[in-house]
């Protein structure tokens, strides 16, 4: 079972990387635009919420497949995306 968790985790690394990179990109551009107009930063919660939902849905699918280790690994990108939602 450990090998299946490892394979699932390594297979999902590109997906997680793209989700976190996309979230970082959206948050960075939103912050840049707010700084350009001298407004307060309002995080793009819709876009980040969709990315969080995609990663969480993958985690739920892994739980349904009884890949507990790989599902636990999915918490890391969700936490990073939630950190991007912080307005400070």
Image: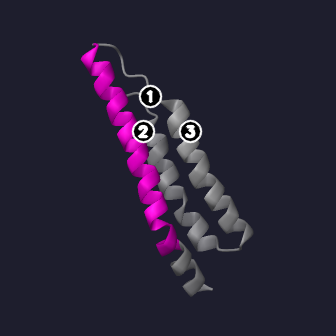
Q: Which residue is mark 2?
A: 84
SS at badge 2: helix
Q: Is residue 45 above or below residue 21?
A: above
Q: Which residue is mark 1?
A: 43
Q: Is the residue under label 2 in contact with that under label 3 (CB below 8 Å)? A: no
Is 71 left, or right, of 43 in this rendering? right
Q: Is residue 10 left or right of residue 71?
A: left
Q: Is residue 76 above or below residue 67?
A: above
Residue located beneath label 3 in the image: 49
Give me the residue at 44% from left, 28% from top.
43
Q: Earlier in the sequence, mark 1 or mark 3?
A: 1
Q: Earlier in the sequence, mark 3 or mark 2?
A: 3
CA gap, disc 3 and disc 2: 10 Å
- Is residue 3 covered in magenta? no
First to last magenta residue range: 9-37
Cβ–Cβ under 8 Å for marks 2 and 1: yes
Residues packed near mark 2 inside 10 Å, few (<14), some (14 to 19) or many (20 plus): many
**Nearest to N terminus: mark 2 or mark 1:** 1
């Amino acid at each position: 079972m450990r090998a299946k968790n490892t394979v699932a985790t390594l297979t999902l690394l590109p997906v997680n990387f793209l989700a976190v990179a996309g979230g970082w990109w959206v948050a960075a551009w939103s912050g840049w635009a707010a700084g350009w107009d001298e407004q307060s930063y309002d995080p793009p919660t819709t876009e980040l919420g969709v990315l969080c939902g995609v990663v969480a849905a993958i985690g739920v699918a892994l739980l349904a497949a009884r890949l507990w280790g790989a599902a636990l690994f999915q918490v890391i990108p969700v936490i990073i995306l939630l950190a991007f939602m912080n307005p400070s």
